Amino acid sequence: MKEAIGDATAVGRPGRGRRPAARESILDAIRASEPLSRVELAAITGLTEAAVSMTVRRLLDEGLVVETGRAPTGGKPRTLLRLDPAARLAVGVHLDRDVTTFVLTGQTGGVISRLARPAPPGDLLPHLADGIGTLLAASGVVRARCLGLGVVWPGPRNGNVRRTPGADIPAAEGRVPGLPDISHFSGPGAPSVSLSTEALPHASDDAARLRGWDAPPHLRGWDADELGRQLAEENGWPVLVENDATAAAVGEYWVARVGPEQAFAALYMGSGIGAGIVVEGRAMRGGHGAAGEFGHVCVQVDGPECWCGSRGCLEVLAGPRTVVAAARADGTAAAEAGLGQSAPRSVTADFAAVARAARAGAPRCLALLEDSARYVAAAAESVVNLLDIDLVVLTGPGFAAASFVYGPAIMRRVQPADHRTWHRSATVTVSLAAATASATGAAALVLQSHLRR
């Protein structure tokens, strides 16, 4: 039996009731703020200088930490410490609807190697095996150096606990692309577009009724757990399966060097909308692993029905599927975005086309995005207020394409009340690694589990 990989909820700091191990605290502090001296580590972690010195000595012996010069202090120079990026490695795979992204990640969160391939029309396992093999070969890394595999599953999962050989990880309910019945944009400056329910998939269709999710061909018939089990058997690694929004939050937490004291939200836009929340270094899961369903925040009490069974959800009113459907239903917007008579590609690709047209000054496409952004900004403000968020990062292909509209809209909504009433300053920023954040986060969760050993 392979060794368990640990609790996937732990991103940096431990949960209540568990005192942080000295090595975990020190490694996470260095990750967030390297390079650091031993004196600085003692101040950050609250450990005694003797405990820091003893733990650092062991980490140096293990090759996890290296000394990297000295910092002038006015007295005796202090030796600085950083993580060795290549000391621990993990592979992350993001199974998107259209593209599979493979990354090899070191313990600092940096992407050592990346590979993107079109999603396969059929057999998934050979596709993954070949991609992982190519990734490692291109990096000159042997399998034995990798601690495990993190997989981003784009669809829903049932149950509270998911296990694969070598893993013991609470599952997160996947953030699911919505299938809108009715989509109507309204409000100042919005285009007058009302979509017919006959032109769109209904929430009563089999896929929506059973899962709320129309699985892409290469994932049909697969269950996240079974995929994890088979990948563990084939690769001999522990396998962790995570949803895209939470994985993206973890990826941003590592890559952006977010401090463990910050309350941090990654808003993820792909073909749907989700959120990953990290508070005090821990990914929030909720009682049933379904926390972060940002797309199902109600933004219109009597709004259209969502596939989830509720009404007025953000995703059905303002998600990428709704924006694309509205653009295709409006002849002018469709022409601006080059959608015209072309067959629908993917939601992500068509949404990017709308965003490109809007950036170029196309008025109808810009109006569609601006109306969507009003709803997204209102929902984002609720998240910031509810959880006292310090940092909001926009990530995923949707925000990568259209952050020039959504970013300012969210800032305009969040910042006035922050300064006037709550005396805080929530920062809104756009990911520098939106294309790989989810895959990096899945790999980072594998690496994080080993920081605690």
Image: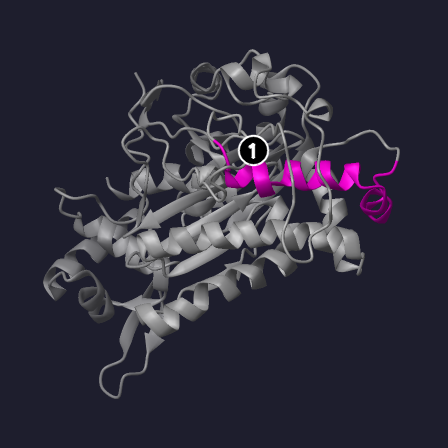
Is 23 situated above or below 69? Answer: above
Kindly identify the residue that appears in the image at 80 percent across and 41 percent down. Answer: 330
Q: Tell me the element at label 1.
A: loop
Specify the principal SS of the magenta part. helix
- On whether residue 87 falls in the magenta region, the answer is no
Q: Please state which of residues 72 and 381 is positioned toward the viewer in this rendering.
A: 381
- On whether residue 319 falls in the magenta region, the answer is yes
Identify the amino acid type marked 1: Pro
Kindly identify the residue that appears in the image at 86 percent across and 33 percent down. Answer: 342
Q: Please state which of residues 225 and 25 is positioned toward the viewer in this rendering.
A: 225
Q: Please state which of residues 394 and 235 is positioned toward the viewer in this rendering.
A: 394
**Residue 254 place in picture, x, y as percent:** 42, 52
- Is residue 249 found left or right of 79 in the rendered image? right
Residue carrying label 1:
304
Boundaries of the magenta span: 311-340
Task: Examine the image and state in which quarter residue 113 appears.
Answer: top right
Quadrant (top left/top right/bottom left/bottom right) for the N terminus: top left
Is 340 situated above or below 401? Answer: above
Is 108 situated above or below 240? Answer: below
Task: Examine the image and state in which quarter residue 31 appears.
Answer: bottom left
**Residue 299 place in picture, x, y as percent:** 48, 44
Which color scheme is applied? one colour
